[in-house]
Image (cartoon, helix red, strand yellow):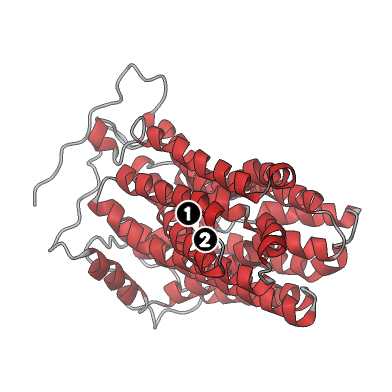
Amino acid sequence: MSTTAPAPAAPRRWPFHRAWAVAGVTLLALVAAAAFRSSTGALFEPLETEFGWSRTDLSTAVTINLIVYGLVAPFAAVLMDRLPVRVVAIGALALVAAGAGLAVFMTSVWQLFLLWGLLVGTGTGAMALVFGAVVANRWFTTNRGLVMGIFSAANACGQLAFLPLVVILIDRYGWRVAALVVAGFALLIIPLLLWPFASRPTDVGWLPYGQRTDEPPPAAPTGPRRGLAHETVAVLRESLRHRAFWILLFTFWVCGWTTNGLIQTHFIPAAHDHGMPATTASGLLALIGVFDVIGVILSGWLTDRVRPWILLVIYYTFRGLSLLFVHGLLGPEVAAPMWVFIIFYGLDWVATVPPTVALCREYFGVARSSVVFGWVFASHMVGAGAGALVAGVARDVSGSYLIAWVTAAFMCFAAAASLFFLPNLRAAVDVADHLPASDDEVVPRP
């Protein structure tokens, strides 16, 4: 097998490592993909008013979006190994822009399912955190946890930057103008993917950030090259043999249910049910985004220093406790305890991502970790879709979100408990050609 010579040192004309420029463009692209998804809750009321669609109809559209979003992610991870990453990212942003822009012409609920669900779901799925994981693994040898934390904050940045703007545009100009603004922002990011973004450091004569010049580059996968779908499904089939994968699937499924599915989709409608103006509720959700940025970057920093599974136990336990109280905190005005919830839930929102990515890398190796995380992320979005639909149906049936809050809380407690059964780590295994042996005989963590 031939080996590739190490890339030359960084060109002198750059005042900093190009990896940080690539990371910046990646962050903007993730923000653009997150912008439309984070604004769907604000669009519920105007769509209900104009078209007479029910909360279940709108929740179904969000559910389709989230499930497609999640299922596309692992295939996108493999596709990024076959095609230049910028090609995949440009196509994804174009789909997001098309789905958001064409929505202004819809008149029937099936068009909502097609545009919100299929087009935007596919585009955002290809631009999901799997995209961030690919960039972090290729461009960074050190500070991967921190960089993945920054990428995880992209969802919060999209929410922070666009949600208040979307609410103002809806109030003054209507929901169609708001959708067009989101579509336009997605299109504006595309030129940055042509430069300075690059798929791999070696493509442009750089080393990954933190890699010494005397270290060889990562070995390329050996063996026959399988088809896109075959390889993606093969990684899933092999991963399903391992207890660690099942636990990561379950915990991230709960994470999706309790964040994108419940809070992001239903917080504004739930607050409105309690008499809170939509502008106030959207401001609170945007504030969650502010603290999310802080929390996820801090979590990335901690992931480089603390055992990832311990962090996840802490995150899920306290998230469950916060959800037990949120129903009683909602009202026409924002009381002091609500501020405590907003700050805490913001810090905890996607703090789970960096340690989950780290566990995928630890248990399944660097070479396949992006695809493995793609499937784990798929479970996150399937959980989000299920959470959005169940909460919407529960509200239509009972007239309240109480059941949804309590159910989500106990799911978080179950997720925290399951992490104690992660198998002990064996010697690191490079899974460029295979995944680790079955761990059925490994005892649970103490």
Q: Give SS at disc 2.
A: helix
In percent of width and height, residue 108 lies at 55, 67
Q: Is residue 304 visible?
A: no
In percent of width and height, residue 301 lies at 56, 45
Q: Is residue 335 left or right of residue 115?
A: right
> Is 352 drawn above or below residue 208 in the view shown?
below
Query: Residue 151 versus residue 164: which sits nearer the camera?
Result: 164
Residue sitting at x 24%, y 36%: 202
Q: Give SS at disc 1.
A: helix
Residue sitting at x 57%, y 74%: 386
**Which amino acid type is shown beneath numbered disc 1?**
Gly
In percent of width and height, residue 10 lies at 30, 25
**Which amino acid type is shown beneath numbered disc 2?**
Trp
Give me the disc on residue 205.
none
Residue sitting at x 24%, y 30%: 205
How crowded is the residue under tag 1: few (<14 C-alpha within 10 Å), some, or many (20+)?
A: many
Q: Which residue is mark 2?
A: 116
Q: Is residue 82 left or right of residue 421?
A: left
Q: Is residue 200 visible?
A: yes
The outermost residue toward the left is: 1
Q: CA distance from mark 1 to mark 2?
A: 6 Å
Query: Residue 46 versus residue 206: which sits nearer the camera?
Result: 46
Q: Which residue is mark 1?
A: 99
> Is 208 drawn above or below residue 440 in the view shown?
above
Query: Residue 183 versus residue 69: which sits nearer the camera?
Result: 183
In percent of width and height, residue 153 lies at 57, 47
Residue sitting at x 49%, y 48%: 148
Which of marks 2 and 1 precedes in the sequence? 1
User: Are discs 1 and 2 less than 8 Å apart at CB?
Assistant: yes
How crowded is the residue under tag 2: few (<14 C-alpha within 10 Å), some, or many (20+)?
A: many
